[in-house]
Amino acid sequence: METKKFANHCIFLFFTILIISLPPRMLFAQKRKTSAQTLLCQGHFQTEAEARIQLRYFRRQFDDLAEWQKRAERIRRGILQGAELLPFPKKTALQPVFRAKRIFDGYTVENVAFESLPGVFVTGSLYRPEKAEQPFAAILSPHGHWGKPDNYGRFRPNAQKRFASLARMGAVVLAYDMVGYGELARAGWQHKHPQTLKLQLWNSIRALDFVLSLGADEKRIGMTGASGGGTQTFLLTAVDRRITVSVPVVMVSAHFFGGCVCESGMPIHRSADHQTNNVEIAALAAPRPMLLISDGGDWTKNTPQIEFPYIQEIYGLFGKKNLLENVHLANEKHDYGFNKRIAAYRFLAKHLGLDISRISTAEGSIDESGITVEEKEKLFVFSAENPLPGYAIRKNDAVQW
């Protein structure tokens, strides 16, 4: 009996080692059958167990910093190639629009727009400190997908509180709409389009150009968003080194690749000669400061045990483990709720030189009171009085790259 047990144990170990040794192209062959032509990795593309095996395989591809940097460049190139942004399109004039400045308690808000490509308008809200001296810290704030048409994106009360709080702390904050969301959805733009990922990533690159054009300190550029906004955060941080501090919220997962076309609708994770996942893409932030915010109610539930340790090893290759942090809220769900905002405020304050005392009580707790939550129409750039220009592109398929 003992001999049989020993034999069975040896067989189990043999097949375990064999499976772990398989490269992704063999390990995930069944998955490839459903996406062989497109090479897409979408949604729950693999199980949690498969994700752990995949990360072990990836980790064996580099032993030191030089080898990781070589792999990192391949991953970065894979993102840009998969998104059809290599080479970059020509950067054209932003043609910024500023409207309806409002003055509130410790901050101001303006409705803004710029052209990421000729005729392609990106709309948003620009929050500034009451007294903004150049060069100032700037924070890009993309948004996620949840919410109803009357309560989503940059219009959500919780989002407005976040933008205003960061502005009170001393940062200029640009909250900008996803493709097909916000006010331009009325003009004909659609979010679920085959090239949304491409345009959305390009819009983020140009959003960064926009805040720098206003006088932002190039050494103090942060970015944070949750859900789909978290994906936008780690994608831009991966391909644009000008982002100096990042806080992707409830999105970095080894087994989940994003369920929307704007996150995984183009082959950014895999090509004929490489494969990666969102954990490694997020790791391209190294050695810049990054905070992963995760919770127990979504696909980031394993972050403290799986995703964070993997990225921490990569930060360790740079000797910068101290610049990576994880705040895990095991009893919370998929959102950018108050406790998540507190974590982001403290991290961004520490690494962007912001004054968190401006939103703190005498006891040191965070206080978001006194912030004015505006109706969404107040945040529109274009209206009947100030219409979208006649030359503006109104449909996805009309974009000229």
Image (tube, rainbow, N blue to C red):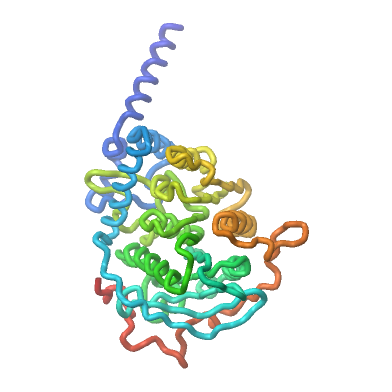
Residue occupying image coordinates x 51% and y 75%? 125
Q: Is residue 48 visible?
A: no
Residue occupying image coordinates x 32% and y 51%? 76
Pick the quarter of the image with the N terminus: top left
Q: Position of residue 273 (x, y in %)?
A: 23, 44
Q: Position of residue 375 (x, y in %)?
A: 58, 79
For the image, the number of numbered tags is: 0
Toward the bottom, the furthest residue is 385
Residue occupying image coordinates x 27% and y 50%? 39
186 over 338 or under it: above or below: below
Which quadrant holds residue 91?
bottom left
Q: Is residue 350 visible?
A: yes
Depth order, front residue of 125/137: 137
Pick the quarter of the image with the C terminus: bottom left
Which quadrant holds residue 68?
top left
Residue occupying image coordinates x 30% and y 44%? 275
Q: Is residue 298 left or right of residue 260?
A: right
Q: Is residue 38 left or right of residue 293?
A: left
Q: Is residue 262 left or right of residue 288?
A: left
Q: Position of residue 211 (x, y in %)?
A: 45, 70
Q: Is residue 31 left or right of residue 52?
A: left
66 over 385 or under it: above or below: above
Q: Position of residue 374 (x, y in %)?
A: 60, 78
186 over 320 or under it: above or below: below
Toward the front, the furthest residue is 134
